[in-house]
Amino acid sequence: MLKQFFSFNYFYSFNFWISFAVCILLLRLVCRKKIIRDFTLLGTSILMLFALPMFDVYVLLFYLLLSFFVFIMSRYLIKTDSRRRYLTIFISTALVVCVLIYFKYSFLQIFIKNRILQGETIVTHTIFIVGISYISFKEIHILIDSYNKKLKELDLLTYLNYIFFFPSFISGPINRYEQFRNSYTDFDENTIRGDLKSGSYRIVNGLFKKLVLAVIVFPYTFIHHGSESAGLSAGSFILAVYAQTLYFYFDFSGYSDMAIGCAQVLGIRLPENFNSPFTKPNLQQLWNNWHMSLTRWLFDYIYWPAVKRLRKNAYFKKKALLLSNTGVLITFLVCGIWHGEGINFVLWGLYHGIGLSVLKIFQYHIKRNNSGVITSIFNFRYINLISTCITFNYFAFGMILFSLDLRQILQVIVRIF
Amino acid sequence: MYTFLQKTFGEKNIRIFILVFKIFWICIFLLDSLSETSVEIPQFIYVNF
């Protein structure tokens, strides 16, 4: 019976809210001393994670091992200035990335189990660990910031609380260690009322998006149509494109609202993840306001390192625009590959990389040839509305690549022509 | 629109009205999800990423 009660969907099942109420009571009213609160937060976080369907003792042990490994390496990187630092960051980051790749891509798991390990029976099932992506993002951030000396100190208990903090464990928002530590240390008892009020408002907002708006658009999405998506009539197909885009927004921003709200009720601030992305007039601004914590992570740990490395090349040194666009393409290619294992995700990443590159080239030429005609066009009253509409449509039609596999996409292309 | 409503009815009243509106529809959709003909609430998309 206990097992039945303690197995639930995060944020929209009744049992979750009962368990969450107990967490609030323990953390905000009972535990006054910091050390007790630290241990209580860690304990409640781990207990809440056990309610997830794919989380068991082995997963916890695995995550603890990985976290301790990263902790030791990061402490070493913070404290030492020796030449081994480069080797340490390389090995430890490579290990975290390999773990992420192994558990994320089922074809790789099957290949390793059948071809490399070569057991007697052919393995077809794969292991998926919940939260592996977001835990890896946090670990990579800790390692690289320790290497760059952006992190000055790392406290074990705060670090474990940062990694296992349950509202943001499954799908973010991807907060930074310093940010978490600051809001966690400023845990003020006088703000309970304000936190409860604004946190609850945020939770209601998230529930409304997830339980009302997402449910309204769901029957028209590609997810609902499944394998029949490619065979839809032109009208239904276009409707599905918009419905799918809105569904993704309501589902994920609803989730983010609930995660941010729950964290706020517990006294911890999480970064924003969405800021009205569909009202932005260009693709760059849309991406700066859509899944913001991931976009920031990608730019900090993929884009800038790639650009810095490319800048050393004499060819790229003189061509700033090409350098920036190559960085954008690499970043969005990684973003696409991370989202899934099909070729369609690679194409989706490239689609947005190319879109942003074209925008950058366009902006560059507008700036250079600042003629009266172009200025008058951009002063046109409705230009913002038109560009917002074009941006939204570009993003929405990219959802075809995201939602349908390559075979279905080819079927659609054949039907059009 | 929101600014107009804020000016006419006051920010606090509008916030309460929106909150009640949202809670009302959450309850309606939750009750609807109990019926056999309703569309099942799907799992969060990003859980699988």
Image (tube, coloured by chain):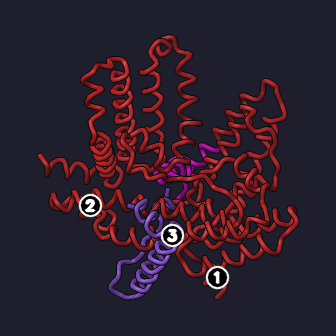
Q: Is residue A200 left or right of residue A206?
A: right
Amino acid type indicated by mark 1: Lys
Residue A406 on image: x %, y %? 29, 49
Q: Which residue is mark 2?
A: A240
Q: Quadrant of the N terminus of chain A?
A: bottom right
Q: Is residue A52 left or right of residue A281?
A: right
Few, some or many residues within 10 Å of mark 3 (<14, 14–19, 20+): few
Q: Residue at x 56, y 16 (%)?
A: A312
Q: CB under 8 Å between callouts 1 and 2? A: no
Up-down relation of residue A342 to residue A10 (above or below): above
Q: In the figure, what tint was chain A given?
A: red
Judging depth in this view, the residue of A29 and B12 nearest the camera is B12
> Which disc is residue A106 wearing?
none
Q: In the figure, what tint was chain B given?
A: purple
> Which disc is residue A3 wearing?
1
Amino acid type indicated by mark 3: Arg
Both on one chain, marks 1 and 2?
yes
Residue placed furthest toward the front: B8
Q: Residue at x 38, y 88 (%)?
A: B35
The residue segment tinted magenta is A96-124
Up-down relation of residue B20 to residue A406 (above or below): below
**Which secondary structure lies at badge 2?**
helix
Q: What chain letter is assigned to the residue under label 1?
A: A
Q: Is residue A386 left or right of residue A79?
A: left
Q: Residue at x 48, y 46 (%)?
A: A338
**Which secondary structure lies at badge 3?**
helix
**Residue A248 visible somewhere in the drawing:** yes
Q: Which residue is mark 3?
A: B15
**Which secondary structure lies at badge 1?**
helix
